[in-house]
């Protein structure tokens, strides 16, 4: 069987498919780990952890429409102590495209502000960017379900 030059590129691409298929889940796992770390840092507000997990230009949108920048997002968590009594992430999907990732999930739990417990049941869209080898939250928008 003879192989023509024009087929070499196609063969090289087909040979790379298994490598690409293996790399994708590893990146998805890294993003999932970043989401988990962010959830932990929100449950037990830690300024250093929150700064390490967020891009300096992050846009953090709440389900009520309020938008916060990085400093506001972190300050609101840290200064309020522990505003979340519980956070559960379900139905999560992760789509990685190079150094960008889109995460969607359902966020349930409750907040503990103002001396009362308020249930939370919202949808979340997050955009993560890989920066310096680490995944950083770049944008987040919550919406009512």
Image: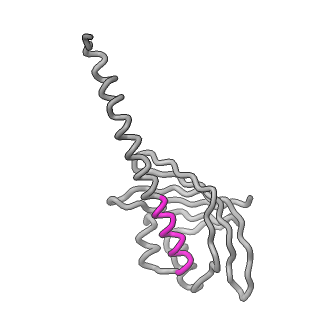
Q: Residue at x 36, y 58 (%)?
A: 131
**Would you say residue 63 sits in the magenta stretch?**
no
In magenta, the rendered stretch is 32-44
Residue 125 is left or right of residue 24, and the answer is right
Q: What residue is rendered at 54% in x and 70% in y?
A: 39
Looking at the picture, tell me which residue is in the foreground, 66 or 78.
78
Q: How many marks?
A: 0
Q: Position of residue 47 (x, y in %)?
A: 46, 79
View extreme (bottom): residue: 115
- Please say which color scheme the image uses: one colour
Q: Main secondary structure of the magenta part?
A: helix
In the image, farthest residue toward the front: 1
Residue 13 rendering spot, x and y as whole percentages: 34, 29
Q: In which quadrant will I find the N terminus?
A: top left
Residue at the (43%, 73%) spot, across then down: 51
Q: Nearer the viewer, residue 64 or 88?
A: 88
Q: Is residue 22 above or below residue 41?
A: above
Residue 27 x/y as whole percent: 41, 52
> At x 59% / y 83%, what residue is drawn?
82
The C terminus is located in which quarter?
bottom right
- Residue sitting nearer the eye, 86 or 79: 86
For residue 61, which quarter of the picture? bottom right
Q: Residue furthest top?
A: 1
Is 46 located above or below residue 122 in the figure?
below
Q: Position of residue 94 (x, y in %)?
A: 53, 51
């Amino acid at each position: 069987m003879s192989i023509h030059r024009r087929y070499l590129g196609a063969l090289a691409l087909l040979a790379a498919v298994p490598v690409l298929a293996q790399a994708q889940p590893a990146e998805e796992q890294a993003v999932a780990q970043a989401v988990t770390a962010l959830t932990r840092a929100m449950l037990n507000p830690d300024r250093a952890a929150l700064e390490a997990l967020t891009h300096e230009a992050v846009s953090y949108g709440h389900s009520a429409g309020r938008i916060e920048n990085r400093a506001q997002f972190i300050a609101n968590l840290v200064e309020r102590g522990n505003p979340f009594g519980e956070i559960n992430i379900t139905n999560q999907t992760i789509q990685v495209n190079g150094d960008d990732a889109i995460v969607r999930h359902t966020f349930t739990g409750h907040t503990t502000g103002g001396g009362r417990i308020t249930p939370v049941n919202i949808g979340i869209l997050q955009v993560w960017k890989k920066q310096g080898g680490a995944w950083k939250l770049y944008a987040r928008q919550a919406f009512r379900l």
